[in-house]
Amino acid sequence: MPHPCPGERLHDLFREVFALRDVLALGMDAVHELAGLRTPQVRTVGLLDRLGGATVPDMAAALGLSRQGVQVVCNELRDMGLVAFVDNPRHKRSKRAVLTDAGRNRLQSVRQNEARTIEALLPDVDGIAVSDALSLLRNIRAALLALAEKDPSRADLPQRIASATSPPGK
């Protein structure tokens, strides 16, 4: 049976997650540049991979960014041959961005490079501890997102909590 955790201890965990995210963001910029992409491009390609395609406004909302900023990134990716704009059956003027085969291949290459880099930087991290931490973080995220279902007065909380950087498949 789980032991309840004091709020302050959970808050310590959250602060550590944010601090880790800041450190990871700096490192991932360097890893992405090695693949010839900037982090916003990788985030956009990753989102398109998870969604199977989306309009720029939908991507902007999911990423918490401006529509104009996402449009610039999508145009860059289109010019690189990684994204194509296709007709949208739900809207005549708002095209859907989709990954091209080259885009899927580049994303796979980026992900493999990320994994190799992480393994090289952190060779001694215990795999079981990582699995436990991953499970804990997923459970916390799910519990926070479920708050809106339990309490309609908190209906806006998931939108403020949720992120487009959700792990693939989750």
Image (cartoon, helix red, strand yellow):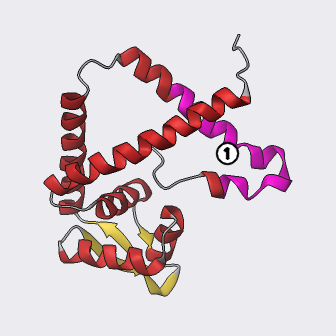
Locate residue 145 relative to residue 129 in the image: left or right: right
Image vertical order of residue 45 relative to residue 145, above or below: below
What residue does disc 1 label? 145
Residue 138, position in %: x, y? 55, 34
Locate residue 100 relative to residue 161 in the image: left or right: left
Number of dots carrying numbers: 1
Q: Is residue 148 among what the camera can see?
A: yes
Locate residue 85 relative to residue 113 in the image: left or right: right
Segment colored magenta? 135-159
Residue 140, position in %: x, y? 62, 34
| Amino acid bearing label 1 | Leu
Residue 70, position in %: x, y? 40, 74
Q: Nearer the viewer, residue 20 or 81?
A: 20
Q: Residue furthest top?
A: 1
Residue drawn at the location 22% of the way across and 31% of the way down: 121
Image vertical order of residue 28 relative to residue 160, above or below: above
Regarding mark 1 in the picture, which secondary structure is present there?
helix
